[in-house]
Image: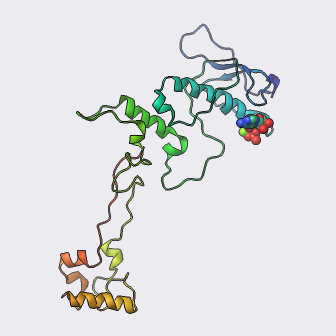
Amino acid sequence: MKSKDIHARTPATDHGHTGPPACVQVRGARQNNLKNIDVDVPRDAFVVFTGISGSGKSSLAFGTLYAEAQRRYLESVAPYARRLIDQAGVPEVDVIDGLPPAVALQQQRGSANARSSVGSVTTLSSLVRMLYSRVGEYPRHQPMLYAEDFSPNTVAGACATCHGIGRVYDATEETMVPDDSLTIRDRAIAAWPTAWHGQNLRDILVSLGYDVDTPWRDLPKKDRDWIPSRKRRRRCRSMRV
Ligand SMILES: Nc1ncnc2c1ncn2[C@@H]1O[C@H](COP(=O)(O)OP(=O)(O)OP(=O)(O)O)[C@@H](O)[C@H]1O
Ligand SMILES: [Mg+2]
């Protein structure tokens, strides 16, 4: 891509004013196939780079502008925290002026999984965790935490109940016993097999002295809790960042 190929309009920069400059000024960009281009990208505007595939749009947007914004930001970050961030590297460019802090959403993202959130997909979570770590107020006697200690995807940061998923999948009494008017002999516990194994479980209860001929709902609560070995379904309320 040469300078004349750049489609961004170039409003005059208002150097006379204080406050943020009107343009991001790129001079001598040579990332990948960029041919020493100069371009002024308007700030506080929706700007689109267009061109055929391979013309260098990503090289300018991600490889140059975002890489430089990230490089500057990382200079202010403690070395131990830098390793949490995918680093774009140092761009091939002479000068970039007027560059604000930047966030990049890549063209192709990996597929989402149960641990994905808006924060993890955009990598904003990394920044929030770092903020918590660096400028959060800690309880008395609590030593400072590393950024990853605020991540649900680490052992230290994950909630012990939901392991960072935000939800606990557990059988409830209602799913185990859909019709509580049935007795155990009449297969109140729907999850038990119907053939020999189910019969065996029922015989064990009889041997242990449990009543298998009373409707499920009339059995003592401690028996209803123990027999299907269930736990109450819980929703995890811990915050995921
Ligand atoms: N990491 C890299 N190392 C070396 N060359 C690269 C790298 N990334 C891209 N290129 C090359 O730089 C040129 C510009 O690629 P770039 O991805 O910037 O184009 P693009 O305009 O964003 O294309 P598309 O529309 O397909 O996304 C291409 O010739 C490409 O092969
Ligand atoms: Mg591209």
Quadrant where the image shows the N terminus: top right
In the displayed orientation, state which residue is furthest to the front: 80
Query: For this view, does 195 lie left or right of residue 105?
Result: left
Q: Quadrant of ligand 1?
A: top right
Residue positioned 80% across, 24% down in the render = 35
Whole-percent x and y of residue 215? 24, 87
Where's the C terminus, which quadrant? top left
Taking the spot 33% from the left edge, 52% from the top edge, the residue there is 237
The scheme the figure's colours follow is: rainbow
Q: Nearer the viewer, residue 66 or 10?
A: 66
> Who is closer to the viewer here, 40 or 44?
40
What residue is shown at x 37% (from left), y 61% (from top)?
168
Quadrant of residue 56 within the rendered picture: top right
Total numbered labels: 0
- Foreground of the two, 35 or 217: 35
Give the vertical position of 129 relative to 234 (above or below): above
Task: Describe residue 163's horizontal placement relative to residue 57 as left or right.
Answer: left
* Quadrant in which residue 43 is drawn: top right
User: Can the viewer see residue 51 in this picture?
Assistant: no
Task: Name the image quarter holding residue 57.
Answer: top right
Task: Give percent across and percent down for residue 212.
Answer: 24, 89
Q: Is residue 124 visible?
A: yes
x, y percent for residue 210? 20, 86
Question: 202 above or below 133?
Answer: below
Give percent across and percent down for residue 5.
81, 27
Instruction: Classify 132 as above or below 189.
Output: above
